[in-house]
Image (cartoon, grey):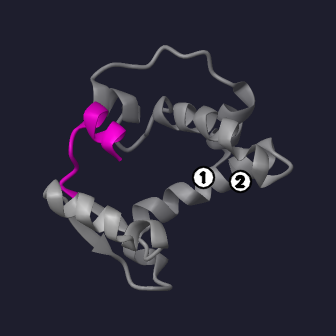
Amino acid sequence: MYQLTKIFGRPRRIITDRGTAFTSQAFVQFCAEHNIKLVHVAVQTPRANGQVERLNKVIMPALLKENETHEEWTGSLIKIQLSLNSTLQRSIGKTPAEVFFGYKLDLLQDASVENQLQED
C-alpha cells in the first residue's frame, strides 16, 4: 500500500469486502494514520461495490481464457490491466489511462487479451 500511495497519492476512501487482508489491524491502522476512510461492505452483498463487480465480470473470463490454472494468473493480470487501462470507454470517449494520466498509453497490445475484453 505504501508503494501505491507514493505513485498515485492517498485515496480518500477504500471500499472493501471483509477479507482478512482488509480487516487486519495493520491495514486498519494504515488507513487511520493516512486519513483514509475505510468502508467494509456487508457480507454477501456484491451489489454494494458494483464497480468492482462489473470489472470482475470482465477480468475473470479473460483470466480463464488465458490460463489453465490459477497459478499462472499473475503474469496475465498485468496484461489484462494494461489492456483495460488502454481500452476506449464509450461512455466517456476516453481510455481510463487518459482520464487518470492525461494521455493515451502507447503499448504493444496483446491481441488475445484485447479481443477477449472487446467481446464483453
In the rendered image, residue 46, in percent from the top left (x then y), is placed at 48, 76
Q: Amino acid at mark 2?
A: Pro
In the rendered image, residue 31, in percent from the top left (x then y), is placed at 23, 60
Relative vertical location of residue 56 with respect to residue 7 in this rendering, above or below: below
* Residue 57 among magenta residues: no
Residue at 78% across / 42% down in the picture? 66
Residue at 66% across / 42% down in the picture? 74
- 50 lies left or right of 111: left
Residue at 37% across / 44% down in the picture? 91
Residue range in magenta is 1-13
- 41 lies left or right of 59: left
**Mark 2 falls on what kind of element?**
helix
Do labels 1 and 2 touch, CB within 8 Å? yes
The quarter holding residue 24 reads bottom left
The 10 Å Cα crowd at callout 1, few under 14, some 14 to 19, many 20 or more, is some
Residue at 38% across / 30% down in the picture? 97
The residue carrying mark 2 is 61
The 10 Å Cα crowd at callout 2, few under 14, some 14 to 19, many 20 or more, is some
- 106 lies left or right of 116: left
Query: Spatial distance from mark 1 to mark 2, Cα to Cα?
Result: 6 Å
Front residue of this view, candidates 34 and 51: 34
Q: Amino acid at mark 1?
A: Val
In the rendered image, residue 82, in percent from the top left (x then y), is placed at 53, 31
Q: Which mark is residue 47?
A: none
Relative vertical location of residue 70 with respect to residue 7 in this rendering, above or below: below
Q: Which mark is residue 58?
A: 1
Most extreme residue toward the left is: 35
* Residue 4 among magenta residues: yes
